[in-house]
Image (cartoon, rainbow, N blue to C red):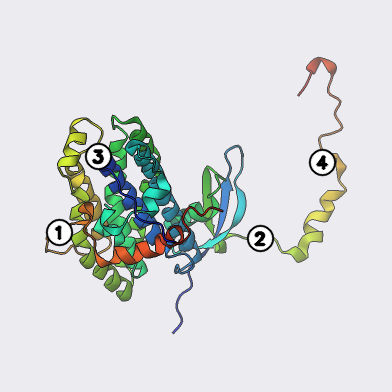
Amino acid sequence: MTTPTIQLWEVFIRSRNGLAHRHVGSLHATDATMALQAARDVYTRRGEGLSIWVVPSSAIVASDPADKDMMFEPAMSKIYRHPTFYEVPEEVGHM
Amino acid sequence: MVAPNISVTESPLMLYLLRRADDALILGHRLSEWCGHAPMLEEEMALANMGLDLIGQARELYSYAAAAENAGHDEDDLAYLRDERQYRNLLLVEQPNGDFARTMVRQLFYSAFADPFWRAMMASKDETLSAIAAKSEKESAYHLRHASEWVIRLGDGTAESKRRAQAAVDDLWAFTGELFHVDAADRGLIASGVAIDPEGLRAVFTSTVSGVLQAATLTKPSNDWMQKGGRAGHHSEHLGHLLSELQWMQRTYPGATW
């Protein structure tokens, strides 16, 4: 008889002076409440953060590495998409 | 050469501090025994973290006790060089870990008292105790949360987890009465606002524990006879074995450092 495996969760932490949650790793937990507590115990021991997000790994949809060229190469050679060609007049000062 | 026992002068304040420090040290040590043996990696971290929190509390309380005693002892002397009968911890915290359910039930019972205790002690007239309480309260709030969630999941879990959790509640319930122990030494401190009357915490303790047990579909034993003796140094057979492990290094190599 197989025992059900405990769900895998991805953990994201926002640090004290950060603006965005960063991915820091994963852990196993039976449900969301225990996942948050486990993330606090495993990933915030050294004052890493102020805010935790946990997401079931099954909810994450990732791009296929094999599609890398198709997805990302075309953007590399389109410099007109970058906002670097406008000359800011002196009177405006620093934007 | 083996380091001999120190003898300690137990003023009311000293006794009060030693009781809380011994609680924290012994329970912290019990949790440290899970190192390498926890059911899953996440709990390995959680149990070790809780143990370290408690040992940190013990250090602060022992350091304050050593200063209050003013007899040339330090925190290490108090932790390592007293004998079993000089320890003043609750019987509850020296009970063996048993299985994970037993450890979580023991933690629930301890933290359901410790959390409101430290919160109330933040108003102590003693500044050092008040500062220790402010720090300890945040730690014990988490211990209570963690233990409660586990007891609920174990009780309202599989047939096996419920059996183990109920057995733990049945066996450990008789040790909860001692949490509210108060004696002549304490009354002076309570009157002067240094300590608090634990009776004032009974209502919140009972409601917290009842709420968790109910959600866990577990029952409280109907027998309300309570164990006692730890506060006076009369311990169960478990403490001697625990101390022989905890104190071995210091006793065998007195004054060793690294």
Amino acid identity at mark 4 = Arg
> Alpha-carbon distance for marks 4 and 1?
76 Å
Q: Are marks 1 and 3 on the same chain?
A: yes
The residue identified by callout 2 is A62
- CA neighbours of label 3 inside 10 A, class few (<14), some (14 to 19), many (20+): few
- CA neighbours of label 2 inside 10 A, class few (<14), some (14 to 19), many (20+): few
Q: Position of residue B107 (x, y in %)?
A: 32, 57
> Left or right: where does residue A72 sit relative to residue B175?
right
The residue identified by callout 4 is A81
Q: Position of residue A20 (x, y in %)?
A: 61, 43
**Which image quadrant is residue B85 in?**
bottom left
The residue identified by callout 1 is B226
- Residue under the image location 26 percent in, 67 percent down: B237
Amino acid identity at mark 2 = Ala
- CA neighbours of label 4 inside 10 A, class few (<14), some (14 to 19), many (20+): few
> Alpha-carbon distance for marks 1 and 3?
27 Å
The residue identified by callout 3 is B11
**Label 1: element kind:** loop
| Front disc: 2 or 1 | 1
Amino acid identity at mark 1 = Met
Mark closest to the chain's N terminus, 2 or 4 = 2
Given the image, what chain letter belongs to the residue carrying mark 3? B
> Alpha-carbon distance for marks 3 and 4?
77 Å
Q: Is residue B142 visible?
A: no
Given the image, what chain letter belongs to the residue carrying mark 2? A
